[in-house]
Image (cartoon, helix red, strand yellow):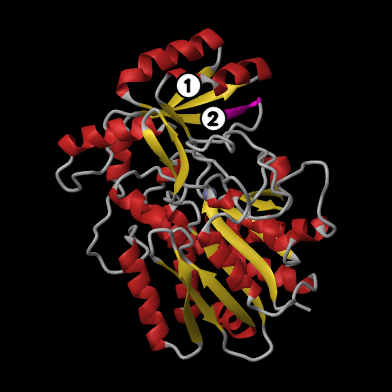
């Protein structure tokens, strides 16, 4: 996508929006779901964004799956014509994207809760408040983003000798449900009166990084709701000017290869950088994880949206599997069972290279492959595409509850499996 589109929209938006004068608006933008059946269709489908201003929301993985695409009013007829010519079937899943986004409008002043999405300041103030109130929390700034914002961590430890579980949030800027869920979990660990949660908070250490991509997150609030990467000018440009950002979940150094669609286009959403570990946010995260002694961290969970998956290593291949893959599958199954019991949400689990697409540079692969942490995963939260990246804020609490239930079940199973021994 096309930075061009962003710029065009920014200028239009300056005229259109009163509350946030520079925010991109999506009035009358539709979201299409295109069903790409074979590789011939796929080859042509991949090129659509070269001649039409559209935003394909998924990395191109392969044929036989659907892709969601945002299309502005000017290009809808042409887009539909192209799909028709390619004989690609489609549905319109969102008629007016702005109307959907307005359902989750952010009140910048509202105090922290899990009924609505919040800006970075409110999230960070809440984190600081918890740190001030509880001696067993150790809070740190593990580094700073490109634009100089702190990246905060909270370590919860109530007992000597515990093993630790790492929780990572919002490495992808637009996935707001990630930090909402991670803070929900942290709040449960600190403040819940549920006996099982109290036991989890007693018997394990929890290392939580609620916001790995603060620059991108602020940008999604102030300018472009659909931004994914960080905000470093990446040294490339196209006809619209300089290109910004690296997909930080493609920047970790484990079998880093640049495999994956769009990963090599510096102006695309999935650009993984010119080399691994090029982003200061990722280096800060890694140095922080490296600062703990070997064997202490036993699980690493990165929260993302969307699709309801528990994605296991590896990402870089779909023919090789981790040595304890069967064990990780049993633990992922436990998460899925626990989560489903809450409200019936079904989570699918398996190696990401198999379930999604082959792509390298994700946190879970680094945590497993480089750090030797025996259970690592990416959890793709709700939903399965009805709202996708625009999950309304009235679902935050339910997501929090189902993930809490999934986590209880995951930790119990991981303990049975000897992960914490
Ligand atoms: Zn993500």
Which residue is rendered at x = 57% and y = 46% of the image?
273
Can residue 336 be seen in this snapshot? no
| Residue annotated with mark 1 | 50
Vertical side of 350 occupied by 286: above or below? below
Location of residue 126 with respect to 221 vertically, above or below: below
Q: Residue furthest top?
A: 85
**Quadrant housing residue 359:** top right
Near mark 2 (Cα within 10 A), the count class, few <14, some 14-19 or many ≥20, is many
Q: Nearer the viewer, residue 44 or 244?
A: 244
The magenta stretch is 63-67
Residue 145 to residue 82: above or below: below
Residue 308 in picture, x, y percent from top left: 57, 48
Residue furthest to the right: 323
Q: Quadrant of the C terminus?
A: bottom right
The residue located at (76%, 43%) in the rendering is 317
Name the secondary structure under disc 2. strand
- Specify whether residue 151 is in view: yes
């Amino acid at each position: 996508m096309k930075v061009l589109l962003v710029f065009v929209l920014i200028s239009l938006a300056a005229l259109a929006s009163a509350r946030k004068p520079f925010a991109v608006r999506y009035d009358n933008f539709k979201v299409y779901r295109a069903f790409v059946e074979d590789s011939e269709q796929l080859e042509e489908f991949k090129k659509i964004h070269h001649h039409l201003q559209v935003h394909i929301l998924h990395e191109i993985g392969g044929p036989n799956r659907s892709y969601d695409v945002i299309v502005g009013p000017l290009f809808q007829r042409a887009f539909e014509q192209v799909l028709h010519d390619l004989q690609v079937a489609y549905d319109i899943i969102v008629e007016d994207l702005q109307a959907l986004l307005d359902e989750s409008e952010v009140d910048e002043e509202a105090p922290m809760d899990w009924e609505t999405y919040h800006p970075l300041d409110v999230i960070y103030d809440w984190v600081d408040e918890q740190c001030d109130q509880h001696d067993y929390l150790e809070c740190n700034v593990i580094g700073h983003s490109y634009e100089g914002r702190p990246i905060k961590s909270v370590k919860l430890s109530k007992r000597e000798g515990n093993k630790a579980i790492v929780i990572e949030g919002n490495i992808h800027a637009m996935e707001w449900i990630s930090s909402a869920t991670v803070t929900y979990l942290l709040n449960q660990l600190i403040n819940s009166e549920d006996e099982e949660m109290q036991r989890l908070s007693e018997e394990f250490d929890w290392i939580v990084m609620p916001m790995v991509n603060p620059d991108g997150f602020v940008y999604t609030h102030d300018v472009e709701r659909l931004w994914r990467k960080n905000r470093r000018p990446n040294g490339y440009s196209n006809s619209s000017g300089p290109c910004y950002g690296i997909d930080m979940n493609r920047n970790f150094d484990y079998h880093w290869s640049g495999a994956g669609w769009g990963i090599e286009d510096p102006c695309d959403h999935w650009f993984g950088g010119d080399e691994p570990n090029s982003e200061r946010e990722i280096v800060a995260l890694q140095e922080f994880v490296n600062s703990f002694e070997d064997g202490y961290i036993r699980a690493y969970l990165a929260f993302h949206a969307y699709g309801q998956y528990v994605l296991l290593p590896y990402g870089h291949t779909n023919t090789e599997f981790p040595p304890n893959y069967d064990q990780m599958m049993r633990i992922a199954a436990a998460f899925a069972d626990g989560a489903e019991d809450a409200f019936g949400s079904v989570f699918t689990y398996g190696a990401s290279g198999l379930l999604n697409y082959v792509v390298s540079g994700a946190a879970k692969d680094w945590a497993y492959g480089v750090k030797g942490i025996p259970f690592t995963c990416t959890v793709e939260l709700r939903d399965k595409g009805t709202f996708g990246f625009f999950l309304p804020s009235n679902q935050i609490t339910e997501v929090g509850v189902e993930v809490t239930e999934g986590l209880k079940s995951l930790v119990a199973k991981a303990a049975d499996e000897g992960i914490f021994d």
